Amino acid sequence: MATSPATILRNPRQWLGQLPLAFAVAVVAYAIIDGGYIVTVVGFALIYAVFVAGLNIFMGYAGQTSFGQNAFAAIGGYASAVLTATYGWPPLAGIVAGMAGAVVCALLIGMPTLRLKGHYLAMGTLAIGLIVYEIAVEWQSVTNGYMGISGIPPLGIGSWELESDRAQLIFLAIVTALSLWATWRLRQSRFGRALVALSGSEDAARALGINVGRTKLIAFVISAMFASLAGSLLVHIVGFISPEMIGMNMVILAFTMLYVGGIGTTTGPLIGAVVIGLLPEVFRGLKDYQDLVYGTALILILIYAPGGIASLGRLAPKRRAAR
Amino acid sequence: MKAGSFFALALAASTAFAGSARAEEPFKIGVSVGLTGYAAAVDRSWRDGLDVAVDYVNAHGGVLGRKLELVVEDNKSEPQEAVTVYRKMISSDHVGIFISGCVSAGNFAAAPFVVRAKIPMMLCSILPPQPEQAAWAYSFLAPPRFEVEKRYEYLKNHTKIRTVGVLYDPSPYANFQKTLAVNAAPEFGIAVPVVEQYKQDDADFSTQISKMESADAKAVIKIGLGGSTLTTAKNIKQLGLNTLLLGSVDDLAVLKPAGDTLGSQFLFVATPSQVYDALPQGALKSEIGRFLPLWKAKQGERDPGWAGKAWDAVMVTVEAIQAAKSFDGEKIRAAVETLPPHQGTGGVYNFSPTVHQGITVNPFLLGTFEGGKVVVKD
Amino acid sequence: MTTAPILEVRGLSARYGEVVALRDAELTMREGEFVAVLGPNGAGKSTLMRSIIGLANATGTVRFRGAALKRDPAAVAAAGIALVPEGRGIFGPMSVAENLQLGAYMIGGRGPDYERRLARVLHLFPRLKERLDQVAGSMSGGEQQMLAVGRALMADPKLILLDEPSLGLAPKVTAEILESLALLNREGLSVLLVEQKAPLALKLAGRAYVVSNGRISAEIDPKEITSHGDLARYYFA
Ligand SMILES: Nc1ncnc2c1ncn2[C@@H]1O[C@H](COP(=O)(O)OP(=O)(O)O)[C@@H](O)[C@H]1O
Ligand SMILES: [Mg+2]
């Protein structure tokens, strides 16, 4: 699980374990310095890191499955888009309103669906993602359907806007760092332990006095808040939203990032998002072979790092345990 | 070992970003197209049309002494991906102009950055809705209402039919066209008592067609692509009706079986290049005549419609550069807006500071099949 | 038997769907008692434990120190009953420390109360102390069982239920764990121990119930059991 800073200092061998994280941070720093189009690539990766960090709470910690997280990104994204572009709200207010909307929806959706287990929960959440996508397409008067909403202002506070790409990237880096820190704190808390406990055995967790249903519901709501935040960030960075931006491909990408980065680890969402965000760019020159090589790279990563790249660092303590 | 493979990856990543070569000789044209995803069929045609056009221009000495070079990036028909590839083509490839495909949402999403970089966008899609973004964008698409109006015009001028039924599929474009069809009808003195939807994979539309028949609709305005046109034709024939079937713009290969079934009862909206042989001599025919042999040499019998528009976009760009005597984005943009009307393969493009959708005169024709050959009716 | 009853089970029945796994169970324990529940595999022992703490779909009443228990595991845990479940139920991916913290879930934060309990558990099972940061799933079976017991003790229960703690353990390790239970019992903790290995349990328990076919079929005094034959009489009566 997560390694506290103090443990790292006590055990220098664990420095090795933090190399993937160091790589991800280095990529972000490089993008801030370079300023080219890698800013866009890394910016999207950071937004996805926030989205995946939320998914990680529900899937990695609580051991549940949701294929419908894009629904909450849609709620955040469209709330931000409509409130800022159409009604002239400041971005921050739009983000907060989106998150509030996501909380309400997650509660309404979560109460019936979280009774489902395993495949049924996965199918139930999948349906929610598809339904919200359809609403985004059909509710033309608000969402403008496939044409989408443009003219969404960049992020900013008051009259001060984050105009430059670099400023936006730095802002995203801070938001991502705070998000990961929040998930780490959450994981270390009583609530976080309850999540991991119920993912291991719901009965064993119940016997300890954990209210399994309520704990799962809260995890779902928190992950929805992260998804909503990511959706809002996405539309402010792009300045545009249309249904395709919050479709199933978002879920597929997020799952890939979560498993490649390391499900259940704190830094996995960031590492996965950066690696998966960069891979297509690394292979872009290959043109028609890009998808093939990308797929091969994914498979290799999952073979050689089955617990995700973030867990490569856990090799050191594991070996010690085996001795 | 595991860590090793990971760092090989990291290294590859860092070297890939290190060298983004500056543009030297050729003038680079950025192309954001959905080579995969829903737009693939149209956008692949668009790209292949650009290929033919750029080869042609380069074979004739290029523009102002420079060759043209295409930088093609797949946006996977997704807006977010489009933003990435646009940004890449701006900051890594330093393209001087964009001639991009039909993924509207992708073009909209990228428009703010493209405008900030002061790069004109020639588009296969519709224009971005924001005025400050549309200012840098030029659409080579014919206004959607032309497709419907051509059919109404024909009915009004050549037949006594004043009552029609509209049959459409649930795709967004068909939905949009349906609304246009209903709204435009009164202008032509036409009534639309029946508007019916079908699902693309339904095998029988007899119910919808019978409803139209009982409402005295003597023609079916069919909106939607693919095999459903043949299904409609078959149903009309089976029901023994003398109703006309007027199809939308589509691939000739798709339209021909419907013509074989219904004969002269079947008419369709045709792009000029689809009916090249039947065109009268003139500027349109000679422009298509420049493009079509080159297209056929490379692509055989593949439908030239979208590719022809891509060709047009390249030719307008070339003319604008020559008129501007410059490769500067702002100057090219100014030149596009002051060029004389340009006869393209898909119609006449007449851009101005206020008109950024260049086709203002309906370029479509109404075709039918006679003895298996395309004939122009109007 | 002069002390008050700590646990009174009356007419407790439980079913899994259509299958009735426990019928009209009656069981009484006094404060400070060490009671064993014996019976063959599939008899309904685990179902009895799960029904007591409110995990199973059960009917009937369970009274704890005179008050009726709600059929809600959290309420039961709060009242002072802890279960060491069959198969240990430790949380493999978490550290030993975190597993112990989860045992004290009901008291929330880490106050002095918590530190006192932790010290007691680590004193009882010194092996856990060396492994606090280790991932629980990487420990040996015996250590995991110690952790399971230790985690239950972190709730500071008045009554501990243990469901076959000897399962899959070497006899020496089992003896060590049961030894510590006897110690706790001497300190006043009431213990309800489920075991298939009757001789083990009977060495420690003051009294035993036999469960077979979903019913409590007998109550026996360990002192009267001297041979395998004696026991078999109860099992297969
Ligand atoms: N989750 C379950 N679903 C269905 N039947 C069960 C379940 N758990 C136990 N049973 C059945 O209930 C009966 C009692 O099981 P259990 O209480 O586990 O027995 P024991 O602990 O004495 O071995 C057995 O017949 C068993 O097959
Ligand atoms: Mg059992």
Image: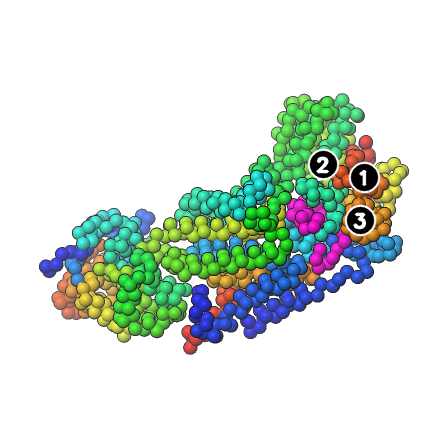
Please identify, in this view, whether the residue under mark 1 or under mark 2 is nearer the observer.
Answer: 1
Is residue B307 shown left or right of residue A77? Answer: right
> Which residue is identified by label 2?
B144
The magenta span reads: B90-116
Above or below, C166 relative to A163? below
In three-dimensional space, the C-alpha distance between marks 1 and 2, rounded to whole angstroms, equals 17 Å
Q: Which residue is disc 3 drawn over?
A: B331
The subunit letter for the residue under badge 1 reads: B
In the picture, measured across the screen, residue B170 lies left or right of residue B62, that is left
Mark 3 is on which residue type?
Lys
Percent coordinates x, y for residue C199 in the rendering? 21, 69
* x and y, in percent, of residue A12 in the image: 47, 75
Evaluate if marks 2 and 3 touch, with contact meaning CB atoms under 8 Å apart.
no
**Count of labels in the image:** 3
Q: Residues within 10 Å of mark 1 (few under 14, many from 20)?
A: many
Tell me if mark 3 has few (under 14), some (14-19) or many (20+) residues whose alpha carbon lies within 10 angstroms of its own: some
Q: Mark 1 sits on what residue?
A: B350
Contact flag, marks 1 and 2 (Cβ < 8 Å): no
Picture residue at 20% right of the left edge, 53% below the top: C64
The reply, left or right, for residue A270 in relation to residue B146 is: left
Specify whether residue A161 is in view: yes
Closer to us: A194 or A91: A91
Q: CA distance from mark 2 to mark 3?
A: 30 Å
From the viewer's side, name the closer residue of A222 and A276. Answer: A222
User: Are labels 2 and 3 on one chain?
Assistant: yes
Q: Is residue A123 left or right of residue C151?
A: right
- Does the magenta run of residues contain B340? no
